[in-house]
Amino acid sequence: METKPSLIASDSAYIGQVLMAMAECTSAGLSKFSGWMLIGYAAILGALLANLDSAAKFLASGTLSRLALLFSVVVLLNLLQRYSAAVVSSNAEVGKKVKEQPIPPNMDITVFLTELEHATLWPARLMVRRSNRKLLAGDLAAGGRLLSTFAQVEAWLVFAQVLVSVAATLVLACGLRG
């Protein structure tokens, strides 16, 4: 049976900080890429719609409506990715600001975490409660792992955007009349 190596609190905290920084950088890069991809798609669709009379001569019936539908899917994926990016960037920023503050010498961590949980609305409260349990158990890397997971979800959402955009390109290519 394989056992996990035990970490001291400073190692766990450092790992959490590294994971948080990785998630923040990954998220920022994905947001830029996703945004440019959305802008490119919108520009192509906008050009087709702006020149509908002349474009209709070269496009099979229904091609523009399929492109518009696929664009809607890309927009939805982009919105989900941007929401996840907002969670990652805001949590990373809070982590930086909290790190700059001195810890009150008589602070009761249990009371602090309970108040944090009470200040959070459902369903996020469930995540906060789970993270609090991990923190109280000594897992100081839990927050960084959670942000890393959010950044990976973002990566999958952006990958799905790429696939839908490629599908749109195929729809356009197949919809051209010679």
Image: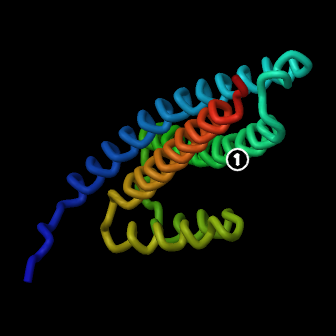
Q: Residue at x 53, y 64 (%)?
A: 112
The scheme the figure's colours follow is rainbow
Mark 1 element type: helix
Counting from the top left corner in percent of width and height, residue 13 is at 30, 52
Q: Is residue 15 left or right of residue 41?
A: left
Furthest residue to the front? 178
Answer whether residue 1 is visible to the viewer in this image.
yes
Q: Is residue 159 left or right of residue 170?
A: left
Residue on which disc 1 sits: 73
**Of 60 and 9, the residue lying toward us:** 60
Q: In which quadrant of the rendered image does the C terminus lie?
A: top right
Counting from the top left corner in percent of width and height, residue 166 is at 56, 37
Answer whether residue 90 is visible to the viewer in this image.
no
**Of 178 and 55, the residue lying toward us:** 178
Q: In which quadrant of the rendered image does the N terminus lie?
A: bottom left
Counting from the top left corner in percent of width and height, residue 75 is at 71, 41
Furthest residue to the left? 1
**For the image shown, how many numbered marks are present on the structure?**
1
What residue type is disc 1 on? Answer: Val
Counting from the top left corner in percent of width and height, residue 131 is at 46, 67
Please tell me whether residue 130 is drawn above or below residue 41 in the rendered image: below
Q: Quadrant of residue 85?
A: top right
Please tell me whether residue 140 is drawn above or below residue 167 in the rendered image: below
Please tell me whether residue 96 is drawn above or below residue 121 in the rendered image: above
Mark 1 neighbour class, 10 Å CA radius: few under 14, some 14 to 19, many 20 or more: some
Q: Residue at x 68, y 63 (%)?
A: 119
Q: Is residue 113 left or right of residue 7?
A: right
Q: Residue at x 36, y 40 (%)?
A: 22
Q: Residue at x 49, y 44 (%)?
A: 159
**Of 58 and 110, the residue lying toward us:** 58
Q: Quadrant of residue 165?
A: top right
